[in-house]
Image (cartoon, grey):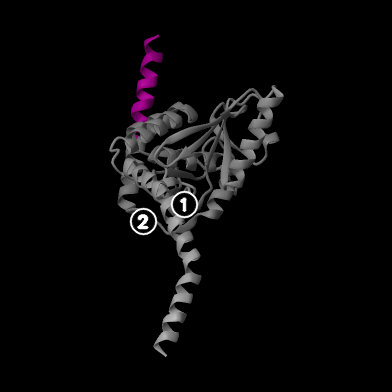
Amino acid sequence: MLLALLALALIAVVLAMPLAVRRIEEWRGDRPQRRRGDVHSLDELYDPGRERRAEQRARELLRSCVNEEEWGMYRDLGFIRVAGRHARREIDRGARAAYAYLVYPHKPIVAYVPHSGQLLSEYCVEFPDLTGSGGRHRLPASDDVLAKWMALTSDEDRVIRRANMHLIGRQLDPARVRRDLWRLAEWERRRGDRQRVPQSQR
Amino acid sequence: MKFLRMKPGHGEVLLAEGDPSVQEDEERLVEEFRRQLDEGMWAAVPVTNAGSGRREAQMVKDYADIPPESERVIFFPRASGG
């Protein structure tokens, strides 16, 4: 009986041998790649200037795409105002947009009425790069702003359809947004003054 | 013409560059354009509005839609609800 069991065990070991050898070879073949992968991910983890350089490049790209006024707004205030394209009434089709958006980096887009300052809604939207390496999916802050700006100025309906709409206050503090609108008004007033001064000096 | 792509951790990355009037370059650009759209990117071209003179973007869904005078096309991940 014991002899039969030993014989069966021997047969099982012989049959399993090719499979075990193949597994060992695969494991040895993968090892250098795994090491390289580890080093690569460590490189990404231990480069403190990487995000800063990425943001610097993103700022330059944003600056090269948007209007001078919008760039100044972003540089000084940290957000960009984009005019809405739609108008329900004929009276709203004038030079002044009936509504506009405040575009913040990595925060919801805020729709508001420029004439009254009334806050309308928050549009939560993001641009995740799912092909990103090292688990990075988030664009640099200025790239996020540029992506929103391009989406709003080229195809407002599409980006608004894709966004999750919420009432004001879900992610952004309404008091902070109102303060930003006040800062924007002050910024425009000062900018207007600066532009008028050289003209009056001529 | 330059094809740029926004990338996390990098800023923009140059994907391809070429003269669309040269057939070889154009074929390379068309191939890259399709590859980016297949990867789920949106493509936009910064332009100046002829009427208002303001800068804005024009979304392009096909290589043929790229305005001929464009210097760059920017690819960025498509929007999703946050």
Q: Amino acid at mark 1?
A: Val
**Most common SS among magenta residues:** helix
Residue under label 2, please give it.
Answer: A171
Identify which residue, B10 or A58, lies in the foreground.
B10
Which labelled disc corresponds to residue A174? none
Mark 2: few, some, or many residues within 10 Å (few <14, many ≥20)?
A: few
Identify which residue, A31 or B29, lies in the foreground.
A31
Residue lying at 68% horizontally and 28% vertically, measured from the top left: B26
Give, as a single range, the part of the protein colored magenta.
A186-202
Location of residue A49 in the rendering, given as x and y in whole percent from the top left corner: 30, 35
Of the two numbered discs 2 and 1 in the rendering, the one whose residue sits closer to the viewer = 1
Q: Is residue A23 above or below residue B68?
A: below
Return the disc, 2 or 1, that comes first in the chain's sequence.
Answer: 1
**Residue A40 sits in quarter:** top left
Identify which residue, A175 or A9, lies in the foreground.
A9
- Looking at this view, name the residue that lies furthest to the front: A3
Mark 2 element type: loop
Evaluate whether residue B66 shows in this view: no
Q: Amino acid at mark 2?
A: Gln
Q: CA distance from mark 2 to mark 1?
A: 12 Å
**Image quadrant in which the N terminus of chain A is located:** bottom left
Residue under label 1, please give it.
Answer: A125
Evaluate whether residue A1 shows in this view: yes
